[in-house]
Image (tube, rainbow, N blue to C red):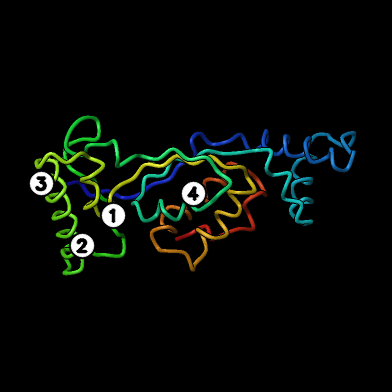
């Protein structure tokens, strides 16, 4: 059994200026003001539509993110409806054989200190789950049947593509101080990536630090 830290990364990082230019081109159709497009106008146009709450124009640009996190966090992520997902499948992955590797991989809860009784309780539970999973495979059960004993901390890889408006909603919920701590562990650094890649659009949502 391996223990890893979670991660989230833009895949790839969008061209921020190109994104703003496209938002402006699409959005100015509403105002019939395409003649006003010029050097530097896209940034101010984006500020204007955000100020007015005219977020529908942000739906013309999307971004893809690769998450590596535990299954519990993925259950929260996929509740965001306006998105496309590709997720590692416990039905088809055999965690003892093949490309999935030998043994399960779990995401460590950052709030448990290694060596403490709480850490040992978590680690032992994951180890027992792996042992039970292998035993079920030994008894002739398929991976999709044996997965019934896999822990919530099981590592899951998930690719999510959503438009900018949907990402703003994602960060409002998932980078908020009230969000689950392991959700914030991936969402807050990801928000910083979005802010670095795209000016203005994500400055007013979420919290940039876990």
Instruction: For the C terminus, give its image quadrant.
Output: bottom left
Question: Secondary structure beneath disc 1?
Answer: loop
Residue 33 at x, y = what percent?
89, 39
Foreground: disc 3 or disc 2: 3
Which of 197 and 129 lies nearest the eye of the viewer? 129
Picture layout, residue 181 above or below residue 132: below
Which residue corresponds to mark 4?
Answer: 190
Q: Earlier in the sequence, mark 1 or mark 2?
A: 2
Whether residues under marks 3 and 2 lie with C-beta atoms below 8 angstroms apart, the answer is: no
Question: Secondary structure beneath disc 3?
Answer: helix
Give the distance between the C-alpha atoms of the residues marked 1 and 3, in whole angstroms: 19 Å
Q: Earlier in the sequence, mark 1 or mark 4?
A: 1
Residue at the spot 79% in from the left edge and 56% down from the top edge: 52
Q: Earlier in the sequence, mark 3 or mark 4?
A: 3
Which of 166 and 16 lies nearest the eye of the viewer? 166
Foreground: disc 4 or disc 2: 2
Give the distance between the C-alpha atoms of the residues marked 3 and 4, in whole angstroms: 38 Å
Question: Secondary structure beneath disc 2?
Answer: helix
Picture layout, residue 158 above or below residue 108: above
The reply, left or right, for residue 47 in relation to residue 112 is right
Which residue corresponds to mark 1?
Answer: 153
Which residue corresponds to mark 3?
Answer: 135
Whether residues under marks 1 and 2 lie with C-beta atoms below 8 angstroms apart, the answer is: yes
């Amino acid at each position: 059994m391996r223990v890893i830290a979670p991660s989230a990364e833009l895949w790839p990082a969008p061209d921020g200026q190109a994104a703003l230019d496209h938002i402006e081109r699409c959005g100015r159709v509403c105002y019939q003001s395409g003649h006003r497009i010029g050097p530097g106008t896209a940034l101010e146009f984006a500020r204007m539509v955000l100020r007015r709450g005219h977020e529908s124009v942000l739906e013309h640009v999307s971004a893809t993110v690769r998450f590596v996190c535990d299954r519990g966090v993925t259950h929260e992520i996929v509740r965001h409806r306006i998105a496309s997902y590709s997720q590692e499948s416990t039905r088809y992955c055999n965690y003892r054989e093949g490309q999935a590797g030998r043994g399960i991989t779990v995401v460590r809860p950052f709030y448990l200190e290694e060596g403490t009784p709480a850490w040992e309780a978590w680690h032992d539970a994951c180890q027992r789950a792996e042992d039970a999973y292998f035993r079920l495979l030994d008894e002739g059960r398929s991976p999709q049947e044996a997965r019934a004993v896999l822990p919530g901390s099981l590592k899951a890889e998930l690719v999510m593509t959503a438009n900018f408006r949907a990402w703003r909603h994602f960060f409002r919920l998932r980078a908020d101080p009230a969000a689950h701590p392991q959700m914030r562990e991936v969402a807050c650094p990801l928000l910083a990536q979005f802010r670095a890649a795209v000016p203005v659009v994500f400055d007013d949502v979420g919290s940039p630090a876990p």
